[in-house]
Amino acid sequence: MRLWTGKTIAPDGKFDLVSGYHTPNYAPLFENFGQVDIAVDNNGVMHAVANGYGLVFNATRDTAIGNAFPVLYWNSSSNTWVSISDRSY
């Protein structure tokens, strides 16, 4: 019997959460716009895709100056969020 253990994979408003994202000082807001879909493959790897709505902050990260809307992907093997949408989003 396998036991299920919960894990936070997307803390709200965390800077630098999305690996290699092209917009500096981006903080995704998963809680506000929680469109997330998760599936488990035959090897037990979890895959998640999410609307990465978030805020873009100034250089000192104390004032929001814009929004960003990337599509984000995560899996339990890499444990890393990446943007999979076009840079124009």
Image (cartoon, rainbow, N blue to C red):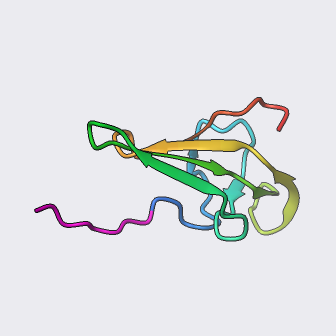
Q: Residue at 85%, 32% (x, y): give it.
A: 88
- Percent from the top left, x then y, of residue 55? 78, 59
Q: Main secondary structure of the magenta part?
A: loop
Q: Relative to 72, is 58 on the left or the right?
A: right
Q: Quadrant of residue 54?
A: bottom right
On whether residue 2 falls in the magenta region, the answer is: yes
Q: Please state the total of marks drawn on the protein image.
A: 0
Image quadrant where residue 33 sits: bottom right
Task: Specify the farthest residue to the top.
Answer: 86
- Of residue 48 and residue 86, the one placed in the foreground of this image is 48
Q: Residue furthest left?
A: 1
> Is 85 in front, or is 3?
3
Task: Point out residue 10 in the picture as x, y percentages from the top left corner.
Answer: 53, 60
Q: Is residue 26 left or right of residue 72?
A: right
In the displayed structure, 20 sits above or below 55; it is: above
- Assign the N terminus to one quadrant of the image: bottom left
- The residue positioned 77% from the left and 69% from the top of the image is 62
In this picture, residue 32 sits left or right of residue 36: right
Q: Which residues lie in the magenta part?
A: 1-8
Above or below: residue 22 compared with residue 13:
above
List x then y, in percent, for residue 65. Answer: 89, 59
Which residue sits at x=34%, y=40%? 77
